[in-house]
Amino acid sequence: EKVAAMNAKKALQKKLEGGDEAEKPGKFVLKCPKGTRDYGAKAMAVRESVLKIMTDTFKRHGAETIETPVFELRDVLLGKYGEEGGKLVYDLQDQGGELLSMRYDLTVPFARFLAMNKVSAMKRYHIARVYRRDQPVMTRGRYREFYQCDFDIAGTYDSMIPEAECLKIMDEVLDALDLGEYTIKLNHRLMLDGMFAVIGSDDSQFKSVCASVDKLDKEPWEKVEKELINERGLTPDAAARLGSFVRFRELNPDLDNVAVLDQMMLIPELAANAKFKKGVEEIKLLLTYCTAFGVSNAVRVEPSLARGLDYYTGSIYEAVIPNGLPGVADDEGQPVGVGSVAGGGRYDGLVGMFAAKANVPCCGVSFGIERLFAIIEAKNTAEQAAIRTSSTQVFVASAQKNLLQQELKDGVVKLRNTQSREETTVKLDELESTLTRMLAA
Amino acid sequence: EKVAAMNAKKALQKKLEGGDEAEKPGKFVLKCPKGTRDYGAKAMAVRESVLKIMTDTFKRHGAETIETPVFELRDVLLGKYGEEGGKLVYDLQDQGGELLSMRYDLTVPFARFLAMNKVSAMKRYHIARVYRRDQPVMTRGRYREFYQCDFDIAGTYDSMIPEAECLKIMDEVLDALDLGEYTIKLNHRLMLDGMFAVIGSDDSQFKSVCASVDKLDKEPWEKVEKELINERGLTPDAAARLGSFVRFRELNPDLDNVAVLDQMMLIPELAANAKFKKGVEEIKLLLTYCTAFGVSNAVRVEPSLARGLDYYTGSIYEAVIPNGLPGVADDEGQPVGVGSVAGGGRYDGLVGMFAAKANVPCCGVSFGIERLFAIIEAKNTAEQAAIRTSSTQVFVASAQKNLLQQELKDGVVKLRNTQSREETTVKLDELESTLTRMLAA
């Protein structure tokens, strides 16, 4: 009886997990681990086309690439992702020897790489999978094992030059991917610090308040305000004040990037805050480079942009596709492509966590490739594009059993053009010239 | 006192593991997990050049590529690698949910992929890292995390056609890599089965006897014979008889491939064994295709070739570079490049272990890329080849602080040719035409 109940439970679980039916009772369910997927030939072809655009761009900017182990010593990752992130790290079983964990992103391994190999300057990209024991939402492209594509500049340069190159790269990649209109939101950690100091919020609240503010691109202010008061512990006055700062762009839609910054500096408490002032100066310098690099049209100063990670110390940025692609919808009819597709910022303290005496300032950008794959796949479906999964143009056809041997004896082969499906019988000694002719046609 | 002893032990361990010194006492050692490595920009450039040769070859043969998760349900891997292999699998910690293990090779995940997705025919390549908790010998290119590069043909085809394509691909890749002379050894699982049956060895001994016989390419017969008698439990008569079979090629150096097979078939007990006879017929058919495909010069029938893995059911093959590369030595002055660089065979039962009703016959080849990387790296060092780690040809130079801003005001940039290191100052509006001219030169 107990066994029957367990079997029923197992069968239900199977169904919920979407795995194939087991062949016979007692045999395990044939499936990928929760939150992971196979990339079949079609998905790989899409993946390769997207990655080629990215790597071409990175190489044009003179970047090198590296690879690091898929797992790190547990101590390397410990304490780098905050409390929430830390919980989501995959640990390996202790089988004797070192304690290991799967990488959670590519940034911390890069910092470890720089510190360990005493590299003080490097422009590198890294495309690889990372691991998070998150609740997967696979229909929306959220997996436990997923690709990240990072470009970072490590080393000491003139202020804001590396940031300008990161924004330029975001612009070039998104332009080449041809996904319609996009915006690159831009803010500064020091500006956020300044705003929070002015409203009297203390450091311990900083992260949770940021998390609420960051929701402003999806939720109305009223909802965020309630959360700030009821869950984050701000007074109604402080929340209102913070709202007037972080919504400055939204409330003044006619101002351009520089004007937003200048007008915020007219608020005496903000202007008097050294951090806020420094942040504004850096962003203004960055905007001059954006103009020089021809990316200022896409860039939009956005005081509400917060981003989650602890380790940012300077400018932060995020590319969003504000509207769904025209005519492109997912299985449930929802528009595809809304939301963040890339983001990054400056993190000057991370390498120093591994090698205090040899700290290296860094800034970078990470592309959300899984989402980009999903968008391109949906776009291809909408446009009914045929995906070629192999590079075959013409091949030798041998449809019947033992035919090939007969053909070898006769000294002929049958060629099939994979596009027209036309078949031709060719003598072996004319094969090369025929192939050359067909492929050139 | 106890603490001091522990610290001393830790310091010693650090030294043994070759990690960097810790910055301060109590801080962990900054290193990669045991048996793993970072691939810096130079190693990645070598890796890319090797992989391009391989992927170009696979694509020319019409192959598609896939990717599977880096870990699988533990049950998927269980029992597929024999007792020895099973011990070397990395397990993930049970953090609630499914029990997972890191992939040990790419073949079992491919079989799982075919069974789960009900794919009955596919020509695919897969280049990715696999994980084995082996004793690493990193100076010899033996790691715990290492790349494999597999090409496999799944599906029902005319006998020996897929094998012929695998051999052709081995030949094309090794030819393109330009590593000097190589030999592709060829044998058949059924021929081995037949030989073992004739000497009266039982199935339970098969694997351990194979392991001993497989050492014949490195060790003299006398040593292998002793091992067969003392450790594997063969009688001296049986061992001597087996020696006369597996050394047939070695003892008859003037015979060509077909003659070796024909002469072995003149031994009455072998000729009377149905398995041996079938194996010989298949290899002879394969040799006719090898001639037609132009690879027969590299192929050498070798009755002693056994290969470790349980799952082979038909022909098996292995490419070796018999001599070191001229002038290429490792740090210890030993020749580099000796030994096996690729291998594979037919495994018709593996997919059926996942889906008994939908079995798919398969055969394939796996390239030992870590060894190939090591050989190419040593060759480059010997030839003092300059490795380019970025694709930059000309770049904008800005040597002094704030110079870029001044140049932007003046409307000029300084270009540097990365090969000649020559610098030129160019007006912004002439930049495009100048770059075009410089890159075309």
Image: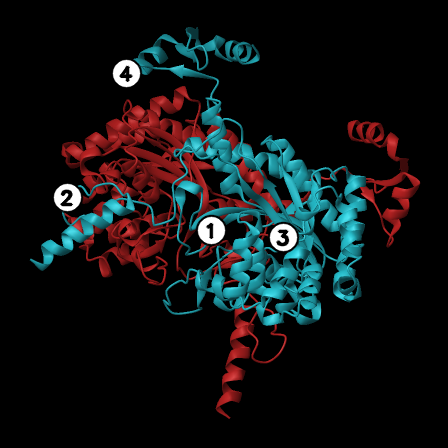
Chain colours: A red, B cyan
| Residue topped by disc 3 | B305
Measured along the vertical axis of the image, is residue A14 above or below residue B55? Answer: below
The C terminus of chain A lies in which quarter of the figure?
Answer: top right
Residue at far front of view: B237
Crowd band around label 2 with a 10 angstrom C-alpha radius: few (<14), some (14–19), many (20+): few
The three-letter amino acid code for the residue at tag 2 is Lys
Pinpoint the chain carrying mark 1: A
Q: Position of residue B199 (x, y in %)?
A: 67, 66
Q: Position of residue B397 (x, y in %)?
A: 37, 14
| Residue topped by disc 2 | B24
- Whether pointer 3 and pointer 4 mark residues with C-beta atoms closer than 8 Å, the reply is no
Q: Position of residue B20 (x, y in %)?
A: 25, 41
The three-letter amino acid code for the residue at tag 3 is Leu
Q: Earlier in the sequence, mark 3 or mark 4?
A: 3
| Residue topped by disc 4 | B402
**Label 4's element?**
loop
Crowd band around label 3 with a 10 angstrom C-alpha radius: few (<14), some (14–19), many (20+): many
Q: How many marks?
A: 4
**Label 1's element?**
strand
- Disc 3 to disc 4, how far (Cα)? 67 Å
Residue at far right of view: A410
Between tags 1 and 4, which lies in front? 1
Q: Is residue A46 left or right of residue A97?
A: right
Callouts 2 and 1 on one subunit: no
- Disc 2 to disc 4, how far (Cα)? 37 Å
Between tags 2 and 4, which lies in front? 2
Callouts 3 and 4 on one subunit: yes
Answer whether residue B58 is visible to the viewer in this image. no
| Residue topped by disc 1 | A146
